[in-house]
Amino acid sequence: KAGVTQTPRYLIKTRGQQVTLSCSPISGHRSVSWYQQTPGQGLQFLFEYFSETQRNKGNFPGRFSGRQFSNSRSEMNVSTLELGDSALYLCASSLDPGTPLSQHFGDGTRLSIL
Amino acid sequence: DQQVKQNSPSLSVQEGRISILNCDYTNSMFDYFLWYKKYPAEGPTFLISISSIKDKNEDGRFTVFLNKSAKHLSLHIVPSQPGDSAVYFCAASVYGGSQGNLIFGKGTKLSVKP
């Protein structure tokens, strides 16, 4: 059974640009969550999607957005990139919302802002 | 306001000895607690969990203890092995709740020396 797949694995952008990251969940998983990992803040929740709807959102500015497609695949977008957006972005999928024990993580996309 | 706190950024232990990683939380609504292990450039992998109705859960060399009155949990690794060297994240969730995301601590980097 394939795991959570995130693409691309690495990305380099410059300030002011925008970026789109992709996440394909485990087959049968319908909920997708996104997290940002930085050395100073650890793992912080960005947002959660289920049935193409955002169910929950963390404390991040509106430059961070996402969406989910009918096949449960998800994308997140960051506009007007800032140096502080350099981080590892992790996607996790689970069977349904509110089932943390079924949550599995991808290996992340390492985003570097120059 | 950090709901899940791991106050020790790092821990160094000799091979064969016990490793104890600590975690404190503030939200009394949390009813599931999970520990994740993370290697560089990989996503977190689930290690062990505990429900709030229990005070101990054991899985091989890993044991998690929960003290609800103190809002404190700890992960014990006995005996510690060099392969255990990684960053360990404590996470909390409300199972079946409207918020399906995990709240993470900032992590503790464990180094097990041969």
Image (tube, rainbow, N blue to C red):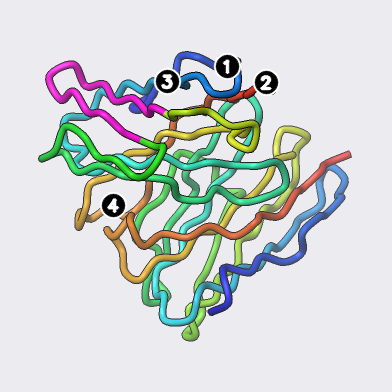
Q: Which tag is nearer the camera, tag 2 or tag 4?
A: 2
Query: What whole-number distance in Å separates the C-alpha atoms at marks 2 and 4?
Result: 39 Å
B15 vs A102: above or below: above
Relative horizontal placement of residue A21, taking residue B98 as reference (left or right): right
Give amino acid for label 1.
Answer: Val
User: Which segment is the magenta one?
Assistant: B63-76
Circle number at residue B13:
1
Residue at 50% in and 39% down: A44
Circle nearer the N terminus (3, 4): 3
Circle number at residue B20:
3
Q: Which residue is mark 4?
A: B99
Residue at 50% in and 19% down: B17
Residue at 56% in and 16% down: B11
Relative horizontal placement of residue B8, taking residue B96 as reference (left or right): right
Both on one chain, marks 4 and 1? yes
**Label 1 residue SS:** strand
Would residue B108 be counted in the magenta stretch?
no
Give amino acid for label 3.
Answer: Ile
Query: What whole-number distance in Å separates the C-alpha atoms at marks 4 and 1?
Result: 36 Å
Give amino acid for label 4.
Answer: Gln
Subunit of label 3: B
Q: Nearer the viewer, residue A100 or B99?
A: A100
> Disc 1, disc 2: CB below 8 Å?
yes
Q: Quadrant of residue A2?
A: bottom right
Query: What whole-number distance in Å separates the C-alpha atoms at marks 1 and 3?
Result: 9 Å
Q: Residues within 10 Å of mark 2 (few under 14, many from 20)?
A: some
Q: From this viewpoint, which residue is outermost toward the front?
A: B16
- Residue A45 x, y percent position in the rendering: 47, 44
Q: Which residue is mark 2?
A: B113
